[in-house]
Image (cartoon, rainbow, N blue to C red):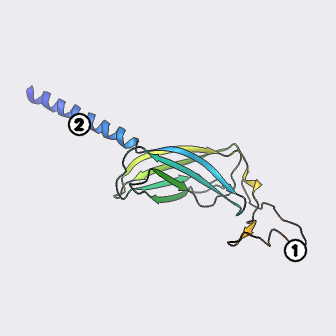
Amino acid sequence: MKAKAKTIAALIAGMALLAACTREMEKMVEVSGHIFVFNYRVASATYLVTLRKTSPIPEGAVAVAEFENPAGGDPIVIREKIFPAWDKITLQSPNIHCVRKDRPYSVQIRLVDAGGQTLQELKTQLVSDVDQSILPSKPLVVGPLYTQNPDVFKPDGTADFSNTDKCPA
């Protein structure tokens, strides 16, 4: 009977330790901000998510972010190396197309250690207050001196600000 009690006590202690580790891992980072970035000068839109570190992150860890593709199809996946000294982690997607006003878009983030094991998972949603159709299809400026783009600003004084993205309804 005494051996059985010791086994049960050890099992309970192990479960408590495992639960404590799980709680600690869940709080390595938290979402501190998220926004769509529309840059009219270069006619681009991107997701931007910031994470605030709340506990130490092991050396060699990476953040893997999956952004819902507003144009449809497979999610947009990025991998960002995390340095232990960082207090803030910034995750930015490559250029995206077809963002619609008031529609929620999902983002899933995993922190992964150097061995590929998931340390933490986060989910969030972004909602834009404007439609991406407000952006022109071509950059308004080109080059390091912000020279007007001749494809937009025509020699006859007219300008073509049209957005030619073909987006699903």
**Residue drawn at 72 percent across, 47 percent down:** 130
Residue 165, numbered label: none
**Rendered location of residue 74, percent (x, y):** 57, 57
Rate crowding at label 2 as few (under 14), some (14 to 19) or many (20 or more) other CA atoms within 10 Å.
few
Element class at badge 1: loop
Can you identify the residue that label 2 sits on?
Answer: 14
Q: Is residue 77 left or right of residue 144?
A: left
Q: Is residue 29 above or below residue 132?
A: above
User: What type is the residue that disc 2 sits on?
Assistant: Gly
Which of discs 1 and 2 lies nearer the camera? The answer is 1
Q: Is residue 11 left or right of residue 135?
A: left
Can you identify the residue that label 1 sits on?
Answer: 155
**Residue drawn at 85 percent across, 65 percent down:** 159
**Rendered location of residue 90, percent (x, y):** 52, 54
Foreground pick, 159 / 5: 159
| Circles 1 and 2 in contact, beta carbons < 8 Å | no
**Rendered location of residue 63, percent (x, y):** 45, 54
| Quadrant of image for the N terminus | top left
Q: Is residue 31 left or right of residue 38?
A: left
**Residue drawn at 53 percent across, 58 percent down:** 77
